[in-house]
Image: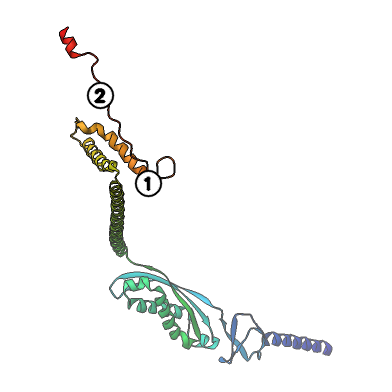
């Protein structure tokens, strides 16, 4: 009986030791922090891994998740500074930095952060105009993050981000904004079209100006060329006149025919080119034009040395043969007598 009682005591002690070990050994997973309480009072925080506590004296108080958590903020009705009613929803990201403060400074941590975020959304967005809300969403997120993070700092919480997901103005306001945007775009299109027309007119005016300048330059160049041509023609005529005068002075009377033939040719050209000329009356001396032209050719050969033999020596004047006069073969007196 004594042995049996001793065995029961040993077994009871072994079981007690095992229970003490299980009660004193605590394993904390990664991403969590456990608070330790001694007789209901917080004394320390257990880190991830294997930890030992005093059994039956120290207990685990709160198991806090220290990973970054997401909190969805439901749709909120907000009245803007210019009395426009809009609906906005958001999402908040927070993380527990101090497990003891988050466990013992606030009750129902997520609900507190949610209500705080709702309140600040109304206050921040209500202090802005509708145009600012629609165009400065990044500024709204920054202000909300700063305000909410300062509010939850005593709780050992770090708000990492607050994002506005959607802003929904009323339907009539959306229609008005659509009409306003359309009017602005039409106005911008008209301004751009007017600018294009003005630029086109300026370019056309510049082109016309450049064309006028080029035309004036061309006319000036043409006038210069014409004057130069007339000057060269005058020099050629003066040279021809001097050559003819020298030929006349040397005794070549055929040189006079040059001027006569030239005048005859110019007169006939003018008569032939007239629009009202139908009949051309040739003068009696017109048959001598051919002879004058021949004289011109002779003068040219004598002056310029182009006489056909290549020596350039003037040919002596040959007497012009007189035309043979014909007499009737019948004696008029004889025929009269008959």
Q: Secondary structure at mark 1?
A: helix
Quarter occupied by the C terminus: top left
Examine the image and state in which quarter residue 216 appears: bottom left
Expressed as whole percent of the image width and height from the top left, the position of residue 140 reads 39, 76
In the foreground, 247 or 285: 247
Crowd rating for badge 2 (residues with CA inside 10 Å; few <14, some 14–19, many 20+)? few
In the foreground, 218 or 210: 218
Please report the residue visible at 44 percent of the width from the left and 74 percent of the height from the top.
163
In the foreground, 162 or 74: 162
Expressed as whole percent of the image width and height from the top left, the position of residue 314 reads 37, 43
Please name which of the two marks, 1 or 2, marks the residue nearer to the observer.
2
* Distance CA(mark 1)–CA(mark 2): 37 Å
Residue of label 2:
325
Quarter occupied by the N terminus: bottom right
Please report the residue visible at 42 percent of the width from the left and 40 percent of the height from the top.
308
In the foreground, 235 or 9: 235
Please report the residue visible at 27 percent of the width from the left and 27 percent of the height from the top.
323
Q: Is residue 91 left or right of residue 324?
A: right
Expressed as whole percent of the image width and height from the top left, the position of residue 329 reads 24, 15
Examine the image and state in which quarter residue 27 appears: bottom right
Residue of label 1:
304
Q: Is residue 190 visible?
A: no
Please report the residue visible at 42 percent of the width from the left and 76 percent of the height from the top.
141
Above or below: residue 77 compared with residue 205? below
Above or below: residue 82 compared with residue 10? above
């Amino acid at each position: 009986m004594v042995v049996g009682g001793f065995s029961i005591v040993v077994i009871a002690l072994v079981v007690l030791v095992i229970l003490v070990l299980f009660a004193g050994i605590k394993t904390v997973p990664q991403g969590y922090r456990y608070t330790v309480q001694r007789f209901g009072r917080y004394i320390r925080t257990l880190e991830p891994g294997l930890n030992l506590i005093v059994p039956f004296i120290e207990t685990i108080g709160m198991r806090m998740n220290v990973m970054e958590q997401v909190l969805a903020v439901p749709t909120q009705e907000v009245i803007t500074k210019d009395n426009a009613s809009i609906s906005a929803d958001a999402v908040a990201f927070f993380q527990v930095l101090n497990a003891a403060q988050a466990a013992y400074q606030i009750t129902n941590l997520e609900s507190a952060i949610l209500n705080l975020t709702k309140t600040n959304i109304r206050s921040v967005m209500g202090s802005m105009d509708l145009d600012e809300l629609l165009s400065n969403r990044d500024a709204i997120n920054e202000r909300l993050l700063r305000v909410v993070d300062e509010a939850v700092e005593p709780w050992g919480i770090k708000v990492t981000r607050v994002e506005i997901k959607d802003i929904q103005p009323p339907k009539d306001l959306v229609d008005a904004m659509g009409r306003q945007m359309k009017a602005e775009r039409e106005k911008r299109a008209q301004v751009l079209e007017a600018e294009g027309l003005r630029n086109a007119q300026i370019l056309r005016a510049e082109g016309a100006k450049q064309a006028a300048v080029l035309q004036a330059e061309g006319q000036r160049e043409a006038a210069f060329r014409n004057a130069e041509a007339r000057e060269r023609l005058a020099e050629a005529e003066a040279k021809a006149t001097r050559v003819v005068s020298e030929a006349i002075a040397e005794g070549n009377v055929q040189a006079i025919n040059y001027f006569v033939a030239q005048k005859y040719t110019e007169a006939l050209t003018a008569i032939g080119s007239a629009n009202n000329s139908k009949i051309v009356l040739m003068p009696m001396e017109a048959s001598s034009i051919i002879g004058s032209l021949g004289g011109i050719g002779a003068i040219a050969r004598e002056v310029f040395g182009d006489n056909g033999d290549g020596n350039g020596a003037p040919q002596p004047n040959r007497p012009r043969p007189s035309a043979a006069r014909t007499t009737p073969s019948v004696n008029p007196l004889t025929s009269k007598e008959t």
